[in-house]
Amino acid sequence: MSEKKKKLTTASGIPYAKHEDSMTVGPRGPVLLQDYVLHEKMAHFNRERIPERVVHAKGTGAFGVFRVTHDISRYTRAKLFSKVGNECPVFVRFSTVGGEKGSADTERDPRGFAMKFYTEEGNWDLVGNNTPVFFIKDPKKFSDFIHTQKRNPKTNLKDAAMFWDFLSLNPESMHQVMILFSDRGTPYSYRNMNGYGSHTFSMINDSDERIWVKFHVKTRQGIKNFTGPEAEEMKGKDPDWAQGDLVKAIEKGDYPKWTMNIQVMTQGQAKKFKWNPFDLTKVWPHSDFPLVEVGEMELNKIPENYFRDVEQAAFAPSHVVDGIGYSFDKMLQGRLLSYPDAHRYRLGANYEQIPVNRPLNKVNNYERDAFMRVDDNGGGNPNYFPNSFDNIEPDHKYKEPPMKLESDIADWYDRNENDDDHYTQPGILFEKVMTDSERKNTINNFVGHMKGIAGPRREEIIKRQLGHFYKTSKMLGDAVSEGLGVKM
Ligand code: NDP
């Protein structure tokens, strides 16, 4: 290579001569305190790790493009959706949820499917999963729930008793549990799974009309899953299987694609809907709320540097652009707060200046200073509003229409309408949607995992969970009881 050689420098740009040998008194040492390069190397190395994400720690990501293929401007005034053919760059991070950064990619777990759309009016993050529902419907339960997926505080081991104890005491988890223990709980690869925004969001159009929406991002590679035993085997063979699959596919030009759809519910339909439309443990049946095609997404570039772009990527459901809004969904409301809070802890208050998180458009505001401020920090411009010096002003065209509330502030835990129906939808999934072989695998996956429940409360926990299986489907209850050798 005829490329001009570069000089080795310290972080402050000072060229230096020796990278491998410390400065010593005589050839045998000791080492001198004044060897600054040695200190810089050791000290920086000691600080390489940033806090691991408490959930979704193991992941991989890619850049790509989103293209609008169908006109939904009747529902939303979002600039991105103003015209068929509009495009924007995207960054997508896939992950498992419960395991640590070194855990295996084929663990039985939901998969994170977090999308960042760099639109001309700011970043829109759709921070979804590969499942349309979740284990809980109230954010107050989240930390308890996640603790049960982590390690037992005493043994430091994963603990099936903790897991099933919590789930059996929270029957609202039944729908997600059913999906998790179907083969969709062990996707073959990130390319072969769907993404769901999961929450109910709103869309607002030019006439200030609000409708409720759910986002479905369907794989064009086809759904493909490992069976339970295949996933177990892959954990040992190649714990980074899904990361490798994505990298290899993109590097050979086999770019994965997804189709984005929405489901639309009017405010009137929401009032009459059989279930709470803002309940994250429920779906909206396709027959009543058909998928409306919106666009396509292609991933075509693996980041040059994993830490820079994947480890430092920060997604937040609170990042919605004009024309897309929140809903009453309690879990969404909790996440609006907790995601940016997690990023401020993990990456610092200026996390949105990190290249992968930076919007395409110019940021104008009065936030200043804090650790790792690496842009011009507002330069010499005023750091307060209102002021008589700059020309930044709020634009009222971005005002959202009012959202009508129909209730009082109160502790509603004892009066949640229709919220006790934890069983109808997972029952339909098990009995009507799954094929015979999917049902068989789901039963085997339940039995295999529940056999791991140990300790003094084993029987109580198993029986409580079997009670939920029976309420979901007698066929399921009978099969799992038989597999576990437990009489109800
Ligand atoms: P449909 O028959 O119209 O839809 C069934 C859906 O189930 C399809 O989207 C299919 O996804 C998905 N599916 C198939 N197998 C599994 C599985 N093992 N785990 C999770 N999803 C699976 O029926 P409905 O809309 O009336 O819904 C029936 C049930 O299907 C629901 O109770 C829910 O459990 C499940 N479901 C519904 C979704 C919805 O938004 N309505 C979304 C996902 C699941 P695909 O098209 O990719 O094969």
Image (cartoon, rainbow, N blue to C red):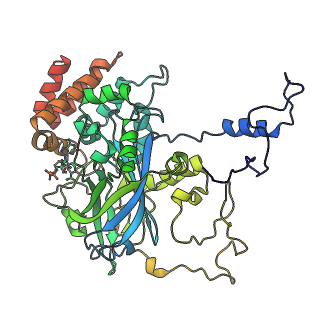
In the rendered view, would you say 10 is above or below 399? above
At 33% from the left and 55% from the top, the residue drawn is: 197
Determine whether, in the image, residue 411 is placed left or right of residue 71. right
Q: Quadrant of residue 183?
A: top left
Q: Can I make out residue 216 in this image?
A: no
Which one is nearer the viewer's eye here, 377 or 267? 377
Looking at the rendering, in which quadrant would you find the C terminus?
top left
Q: Quadrant of residue 438?
A: top left
Number of marks = 0
Residue 361: percent from the left, percent from the top?
Answer: 52, 71
Which one is nearer the viewer's eye here, 470 or 37? 37
At 70% from the left and 51% from the top, the residue drawn is: 6
Residue 454: percent from the left, percent from the top?
Answer: 34, 17
Residue 66: percent from the left, percent from the top?
Answer: 35, 63
Residue 206: percent from the left, percent from the top?
Answer: 34, 80
Determine whether, in the image, residue 327 is placed left or right of residue 385. left
At 25% from the left and 40% from the top, the residue drawn is: 184
In the rendered view, would you say 351 is above or below 138? below
In the rendered view, would you say 246 is above or below 461? below
